[in-house]
Amino acid sequence: MSLEKFDVVVAGTGAVGMSTALWAQKSGLKVAICDPQPAGSGASYGVACTISTYACVPINSPTIFKSLPALLFSKNSPLSFDFLFGLKNMGWMLSFLSNCRRSKVEHITQSLGELLAHTDEGLDPLIAECGAEDLFVQNGCLYVWSTKAGYDAAQAGNDMRLKLGIEFEVLEPHEILELEPSLKMPMYRGVLFKGARHTVDPQAYVTRMYDRFIELGGVAISSTINEVLPNTDAVTVQLDHNRTLHSDHVVVAAGAHSKSIQGSGAETLPLGVELGYHVAFKDHAEKVSRPVGWAEAGLYATPTAHGLRIAGTVEINSITAPSNTARLDYLRERAKQMFGELDGDQDIWRGCRPTMPDSLPVIGHSRGSDRIFNAFGHQHIGLTLSGITGRILTDLIQNKEPVANLSAFSDKRFKK
Ligand SMILES: Cc1cc2nc3c(=O)[nH]c(=O)nc-3n(C[C@H](O)[C@H](O)[C@H](O)COP(=O)(O)OP(=O)(O)OC[C@H]3O[C@@H](n4cnc5c(N)ncnc54)[C@H](O)[C@@H]3O)c2cc1C
């Protein structure tokens, strides 16, 4: 069965896909979204909720070669690694490590910093369009280091932030406690990103974008996109149950699953996955008044509409691996060190960050076809970059000059 023809079909209704669809729909294009799951129920659901315009420093780091043994083998490590999976994916691992060289990290940081500088231009018009102002709070974001060694290791990254014009205030332990009196973990220094925002409910935000998209006449189809077949006139989009769509353009925004869409070009790219977790303590949202990132523990504690969300850690494992209960125990133990015993109900969650080995997203024309556009690989900052990604793609589809330089984000940086 063939349905009507669209200007744009978007694969995926996470923060990135929904932002793209809403930008395109409000620009007057005829748009369909396809996803077998509800909007905002993938990686975008469980985030630490930060709009982290300061997060230009990637997890690729020249210090990784020194810190890797401790990260891999300590029970108290924010990193967990499945060795069998690592062996099977040696290409991605080696490419990740080669992107830990100082010159590469500087390039990544610079490129992410320049894109992040456009965050608000992408996000604010969408928040206004779907009436989500009540879901965002501007009260800064705090990083805390427990040790001098940890803080010193972060200096190179913080220096790069300053060079990029990202402002922050360095805090002594007593100043941290003045801001967040409930914190109990050891403290050496803190950094406050004063103007930073967070959302109290990421899924509600994506759902409001979805609802507004439908109100504006957008079409939602509950199906996987299995394959895309671009030709000179249009793209044929293969859905479940032998259904097809026709569209002038297709945007691949299926997060960590983007490689599964055959014919898009994404299936040829080294898209990896970093699993992450959260535990939400439903009765304790008031413990902090802004997101607090505990640097050595690799997590944030964020006040949300559904409680105190302890979110983070990186697990290198298969996208289909069962949830690792040790990672949830790690978050609970760290939460206890941060705040003391937290009683009451908890929600738990596991999700997949889409991550390229150089930690740069893939945004722009696909090398496979001018009709296909990439919008995935946003690693730890996909909620933050969702709005600007959608705005850029809408400009590209309409043959307009995008607001940001995209050269670092092209898929042409990877071998065919
Ligand atoms: C623990 C944790 C904390 C995080 N904290 C933050 C944070 O504080 N701030 C921040 O900016 N980012 C954060 N991130 C990163 C963020 O979650 C991701 O970068 C972002 O959600 C990616 O969005 P997305 O729309 O690309 O993917 P997703 O939200 O995963 O959406 C992809 C969608 O595609 C659909 N799909 C899959 N395959 C197909 C197909 N073949 N056809 C159609 N649809 C398909 C899926 O069902 C899903 O709905 C965090 C991640 C984790 C794991």
Image (spheres, helix red, strand yellow):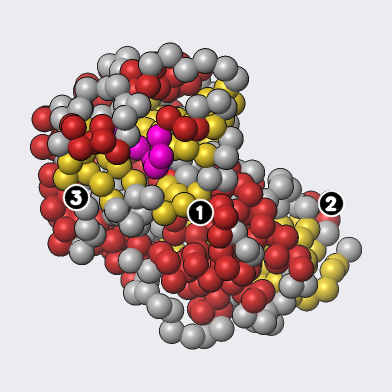
Query: Residue 256's spot in the image, x, y percent?
Result: 53, 46
SS for dot 2: helix
The residue that appears at 61% across and 47% down in the rendered structure is: 203
Please tell me whether mark 1 or mark 2 is closer to you in this view: 1
- Left or right: 310 with respect to 60? right
Q: Name the residue under label 1.
A: 136
Identity, as a three-letter code, of the amino acid under mark 3: Glu
Q: Name the residue under label 3.
A: 169
Query: Residue 342's spot in the image, x, y percent?
Result: 47, 17
The magenta stretch spans residue 116? no
Q: How far apart are marks 2 and 3 (CA)?
A: 55 Å
* Depth order, front residue of 39/237: 39
The residue that appears at 57% across and 17% down in the rendered structure is: 344
- Which label belongs to residue 241? 2
Quadrant of the frame with the C terminus: bottom left
User: For residue 291, which quarter of the picture?
Assistant: top left
Marked residue nearer the N-terminal end (1 or 2): 1
User: For residue 216, which quarter of the picture?
Assistant: bottom right
Tell me whether circle 2 and circle 3 mark residues in contact (CB < 8 Å).
Answer: no
Identity, as a three-letter code, of the amino acid under mark 2: His
> What are the residue bounds of the magenta stretch?
288-294
Query: Residue 299's spot in the image, x, y percent?
Result: 37, 33
Q: Can residue 410 be seen in this view?
A: no
The residue that appears at 83% across and 59% down in the rendered structure is: 243
Q: Can residue 54 be seen in this view?
A: yes
SS for dot 1: strand
Crowding at mark 2 (Cα within 10 Å: few <14, some 14-19, many 20+):
few
